[in-house]
Amino acid sequence: MARKTGSHSEITGPRVRAAALTLFARHGFAAVSMRQIAREVGVQAGALYLYTKDKQSLLFDLMRTHMDELLAAWADEPKGDTALDALEAFSRFHIRFHLERPDAVFIAYMELRNLTDENFAAIEALRRQYEGELEAILRAGQEAGELDLSDIRLSSMAIIAMLTGVNTWYREGGRLSREAVADRYWDMVKGAVGA
Amino acid sequence: MARKTGSHSEITGPRVRAAALTLFARHGFAAVSMRQIAREVGVQAGALYLYTKDKQSLLFDLMRTHMDELLAAWADEPKGDTALDALEAFSRFHIRFHLERPDAVFIAYMELRNLTDENFAAIEALRRQYEGELEAILRAGQEAGELDLSDIRLSSMAIIAMLTGVNTWYREGGRLSREAVADRYWDMVKGAVGA
DNA sequence: CTTGGATATGAACGATTGTTCAGTTACCAA
DNA sequence: TTGGTAACTGAACAATCGTTCATATCCAAG
């Protein structure tokens, strides 16, 4: 027995990435074996290497895809007229986007240390780019007198940490809807930047 | 050759934990072998089992010790008279305590999924207890009319995420001193709770 | 001076790891 | 109907894993 019935390359590839995403998020990159991923897909371990160069590339692809999607989605987001509008748009976007893909977010934050130096640098650059988007909003708001900030970089890091933190406790079907959470976090962000 | 010269049990034990702390923080629990830890200590792998039941217990001990120290240190902290004073004390304490032990903090947040169910429950309970300390402050401030909060639990999670986030970017000898960072974060916390 | 416990070695255990590859099958184009 | 190739298997590779254990050495106490 070798190949199963039907042509599967366009099915199996995404399924490998999906299985890796779930398993890496649940157990951690180092704790998941290629054989576990293969079993989840319904294939032997050797077949995975038709879809990825090695385990490291599998992790890197997942992280780079996530960061690319993040940047692309934010670029497409309407941002309003004022810096305060843009900050509200960013806050709501960040929560929504991250709540929609908890596994990818978890991996992107937790598995950085399992990347090779080169791959780490690439992901880090994308993260910096995203942080830069928020910093630009804060700088504009500062210059327009809409915000009162003592340190833009620091405020940016604080806001992102606060917003991303939602992923650690939010559970679907819980006490609050995603919108209600976003409303309250936007209030807190507003207060934190003195607006 | 077996035992080296001198009595070492009171030296080796702490050294095993210190090596495990550093290595787990740098590479992750699953990616670190007992032999790596042993090499760092200057001992053979088998000797580690004089100081820990197994690898899992080593991780759990590190995490439980960290959480115990956290709760004990906060209990010893002067908290001022008003709820706002207590909130400031908490904010500054949290940043200071966490910046002093980045490795332990990193492990306590990243390696939860590598704990057995039983051990996870124990650590989770301690974390809840710490979060409860902040919630109590917020509740008191709310009732005294010092704070304006729409949801205490949510504000508590947001504040902790924001404060803990300092560990992800702060570097010793950087642009800002720890005190300067704490000053600015306290400003932001104050704003976020409407005070 | 002997004895016994504390401290450590080093070899060994079976299990599992990421990865490669020759062989096998199913599909599609000619 | 036939060939070629895409998709996959199953076995194999050396390396490493956590853990155990018989053995050896050192120190303190009697």
Image (cartoon, coloured by chain):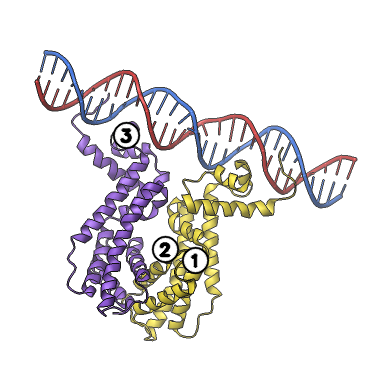
Chain colours: A purple, B yellow, C red, D blue
The amino acid on which the numbered mark 2 sits, given as a three-letter code, is Trp
What residue lies at 59% left-to-right and 44% top-to-bottom?
A: B39
With C30 as the anchor, is B125 left or right in this view?
Answer: right
CA distance separating discs 3 and 2: 36 Å
What residue lies at 45% left-to-right and 52% top-to-bottom?
A: B117
Give the residue number, with chain letter if any, for mark 1.
B173
Give the residue number, with chain letter if any, for mark 3.
A49
With B166 as the anchor, is B21 left or right in this view?
Answer: right
CA distance separating discs 1 and 2: 12 Å
Whole-percent x, y for residue A40 in the image:
31, 40
The chain under label 1 reads B
Please tell me if label 3 and label 2 are on a single chain: no
Please say whether residue A177 is visible from this viewpoint.
no
Whole-percent x, y for residue A123 in the image:
34, 52
Q: Quadrant of the C terminus of chain B?
A: bottom left
Whole-percent x, y for residue B174 in the image:
46, 66
Please say whether residue B66 is visible from this viewpoint.
yes
Secondary element under disc 1, as helix, strand or loop, is loop
Quadrant position of residue A20: top left
Secondary element under disc 3, as helix, strand or loop, is helix
Disc nearest the viewer among 3 and 2: 2
The chain under label 2 reads B
Viewer-proximal residue among D5 and B192: D5
